[in-house]
Image (cartoon, grey):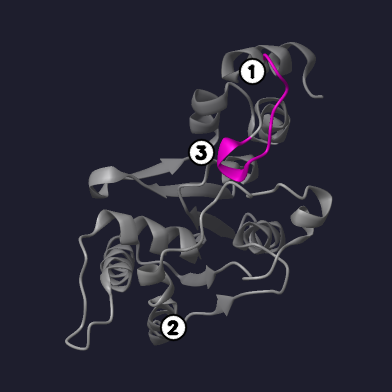
Amino acid sequence: MTKKRLFIIDSMAMAFRNFHAIRALSTSQGVPVNAVYGSLMFLAGLIEKEKPDYFLFATDSQEKTFRHDMYEAYKANRSDMPEDLAAQIPLLYRLFQAFQAPLLKESSLEADDLIGSLVHQFASDDLHCYIVSGDKDFMQLVNDNVSLYSPKKGGELFICEKAGVFEKFGCTPEQVIDILALIGDSSDNVPGVPGIGDKGAAKLIQEFGSL
């Protein structure tokens, strides 16, 4: 029996990537659509190439999350969403609906939380989950039934499995959380341990196993 495949789309990551990768496009009414166009082309290509058995979209809540309660400065370094991208969000939602796939969104949660819950619930020996995102944080979810399907510059795609996680972080997927705790994440405005970089963190985790 052929193993079924579920592709889970990190929808806002896809939208941001296409917004910045594709030159400004707009409708005759002046509505920007470059993120919509890029997302449509990407999804059509994904379906044609991979022929997934199932796929769905996960997106972020626009509210603050429980992480902000734990750490007030979480993502405080990020600018507001560009106006030309914000104007495309309703069109993006209509695009996702046109694919007749579920769009998951939950108050006070990020797409990362939803995706983590989905693969925990559905990945099995009968169903392989592919997380479609360039976010390195998802590497901690990689296992025999979960892969990270990462779009790269130039339209190339990289499927990250256990060996790819070790190549990136020098550890197993289960240890990625320890590595990130040590080095921090500048994109989320989360500091690491002073004086410890990527190589130092990998060496410590390889020696001691975990924090």
Magenta stretch, main secondary structure, is loop
Q: Secondary structure at mark 2?
A: helix
| Residue ID at (58%, 41%) | 139
Kind of residue sitting beneath label 2: Pro
Q: Which quadrant would the C terminus be assigned to in this image? A: top right
Q: Residues within 10 Å of mark 2 (few under 14, many from 20)?
A: few
81 is within the stretch colored magenta: no
Residue where numbered disc 3 is placed: 161
Task: Mark 1 and mark 3 in contact? Answer it, CB < 8 Å.
Answer: no
* Alpha carbon separation for disc pair 2 and 3: 34 Å
Front: mark 1 or 2: 2
- Residue range (magenta): 185-195
45 relative to 126 in the view: left or right: left
First of labels 1, 3 by sequence position: 3
Residue at mark 2: 90
Q: Which mark is residue 202?
A: 1
* In front of the other: 92 or 54: 92
Q: Please name whichever residue, 101 or 129, is drawn nearer the observer in this view of the structure.
A: 101
Q: Earlier in the sequence, mark 1 or mark 2?
A: 2
Q: Are marks 2 and 3 in contact (CB under 8 Å)?
A: no
Real-space Cα separation, disc 1 to disc 2, in angstroms: 42 Å
Q: Is residue 158 above or below residue 46?
A: above
Residue 123 at what x, y percent from top left? 64, 57
What's the mark number on residue 193? Answer: none
The percent position of residue 177, horizontal first and vertical second, equals 71, 35
Say which label, 2 or 3, has the lower sequence index. Answer: 2
- Circle nearer the viewer, 1 or 3: 1
Residue type of the residue flagged with mark 1: Ala
Is-magenta flag for residue 192?
yes
